[in-house]
Image (cartoon, grey):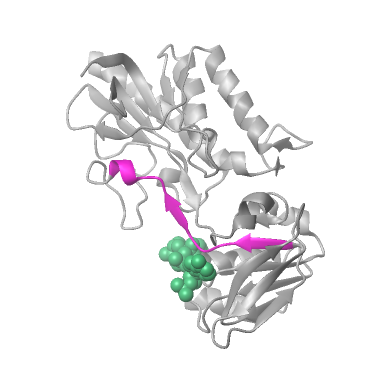
Amino acid sequence: MTVASHHHVLIVGSGPAGLTAAIYAARASLAPLVIEGEPSSTSDQPGGQLMLTTEVENFPGFPEGIMGPELMMRCREQAMRFGAQFLTEKVTKVDFSQRPFRVWVRETQYTADSIIVSTGAQSLMLGLEEEKRLIGHGLSTCATCDGFFFRNQHIAVVGGGDSALEEAQFLTKFASKVTLIHRRDTLRASKIMQDRAIANEKIEFLWNAQVTKVLGQEKVEGVEVTDTVNGAVSTLPVTGIFVAIGHRPNTDLFKGVLDMADSGYLTTQPGSTYTNIPGVFACGDVQDHTYRQAITAAGSGCMAAIDCERWLEAQHA
Ligand code: NAP
């Protein structure tokens, strides 16, 4: 098997974390190769989760807001301007057991002195056909990002875990009413989160209910809900729906290779982007289940490039 090319830095994934790492690494004259992913309808595509959003209003520097895909395109151009190279492919296999590190795209092998992993995470979805059409048009997976758009409206949150309750609680700042739709009659969330949500007058609970359809063509106009006990179907006239049934980090490639928590998130040394393998760094949502914001992902991408640059320098000292 031939080696296609060797690189000082190879970045896997191209959301805000990977692209920021690419800008910093490129400006440090490290000419990174970014294997950015393949276009798809999921959040492991080039540009990551922001490709599935519409308006981003909380990224500093854009007072009028910016569309998620445009923000990512601009970051990509910025990285290219300083010499980052992009490969629109999906990594299929890695071997970090020796240096240079090895990364495969099907049969083609790339080698690198250092690796930055920024493969992100995906929000779990309900699996309904209309979710793809309505995401960013009333259907969201991030209350922090989109809650503001739902002032004085009746919205729904789906899920019964800490995420769903946290989102519901947060959304009551904007919404006139939040209906929490849960498929069972007991919550999975921690007691303290349950107590807070139950005490919040703006939150009502719809128990034993599964969302079976999201209504609306151009934007969300309601949800169809099926009772999980008696099968009765009803409609809830909401203008927004937040799906909060969990996240999954994109770490299948790194199972048995990099240290990760039971939840699949990569483990990094506190306050840094170092993984358990020297020379392999991780940034963005793939190692962050707490903040999950474009700006925090970008910040950790910057950290990864700086950690990586300093580590490479130390190898040659
Ligand atoms: P989670 O604990 O796995 O809860 C997911 C919820 O979504 C469950 O209630 C589950 O229902 C429901 N669900 C899953 N698939 C569904 C489907 N297809 N249709 C309808 N409902 C579905 O996930 P999470 O809430 O994101 O939390 C993940 C981890 O992060 C947890 O350890 C949590 O404690 C932690 N977290 C902590 C905080 C905090 O402390 N502030 C905030 C957020 C998250 P069932 O209950 O029936 O399975």
Q: Quadrant of the N terminus?
A: top left
Residue 224 lies in what quarter of the image? bottom right
Residue 219 lies in what quarter of the image? bottom right
- Left/right placement of residue 142 relative to residue 90 reads right
Q: Residue at x 72, y 79 (%)?
A: 201
Q: Quadrant of the C terminus?
A: top left
Compared to residue 264, the image places residue 275 above or below, namely above
- Measured from the top left, where is residue 127 in percent x and y? 54, 59
- Measured from the top left, where is residue 313 in percent x and y? 30, 17
Residue 242: within the magenta?
yes
Residue at the left extreme, as displayed: 98
Foreground of the two, 289 or 12:
12
- Measured from the top left, where is residue 198 in percent x and y? 62, 81
Foreground of the two, 76 or 173:
76
Residue 143 lies in what quarter of the image? bottom right
**Residue 159 visible in the shown view:** yes
Q: Residue at x 24, y 25 (%)?
A: 101
Q: Residue at x 50, y 83 (%)?
A: 186
Residue 97: within the magenta?
no
Q: Residue at x 61, y 76 (%)?
A: 197
- Measured from the top left, where is residue 233 in percent x and y? 66, 80
Where are the magenta residues, as a range?
240-254
- Left/right placement of residue 290 relative to residue 294 reads left
Foreground of the two, 77 or 229:
229
